[in-house]
Image: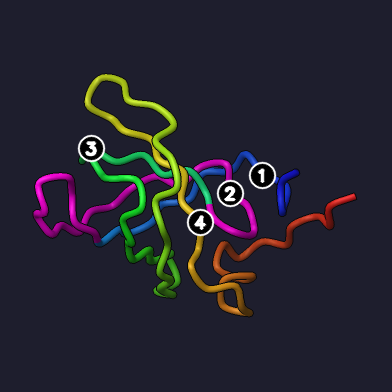
Amino acid sequence: KRRSSRIALNAPVGLTAEDRAKALFTLTANATNLNRHGAAVQVTRELLVGTTILVQNKRGARLTARIVAQVNAMQGKHTYGIEFVEDNDKSQTFWGITFPANA
């Protein structure tokens, strides 16, 4: 059972991480399927599941997240599921939206 509902919204985010080749990068990515504990992010770099990344929202708030799954890879774009490492007020308000309570 999911910990929180997904909301099919898109949000631009900044990502700082190491790619599969251990090269540090910062880029703008698109976050989709937002939920209270993370999202799916689309990037043009190959990442390793288990990697810790830094995610920054459009308001400048930053959170540490972990790559938990590769969801898709198509035409040079890779989609990964991420979950926030912290579970606190900062992570609850990171997306700037209120999530419905799970039934």
As drawn, 95 above or below 46: below
As shown in the figure, which amino acid type bears the numbered disc 1? Ile
Is the residue 43 above or below the residue 85 in the image? above
Would you say residue 7 sits in the magenta stretch? no
Looking at the picture, which amino acid does disc 2 mark? Leu
Residue 44 — which label?
3
Left or right: 93, with 31 as reference point:
right
Residue to which mark 4 is pinned? 83
Q: Using the rendered view, name the quadrant where residue 75 is placed.
A: top left
Q: In the orientation shown, which residue stands out farthest toward the top?
A: 75
Magenta segment boundaries in residue numbering? 17-38
Alpha-carbon span between mark 2 and mark 1: 5 Å
Q: Are marks 2 and 3 in contact (CB under 8 Å)?
A: no
Hey, which quadrant is residue 25 in on the image?
Answer: bottom left
Q: Secondary structure at mark 4?
A: strand
Label 1 near label 2: C-beta < 8 Å? Answer: yes
Of the two numbered discs 2 and 1 on the same chain, state the one appearing first in sequence.
1
Q: CA distance from mark 3 to mark 4?
A: 19 Å
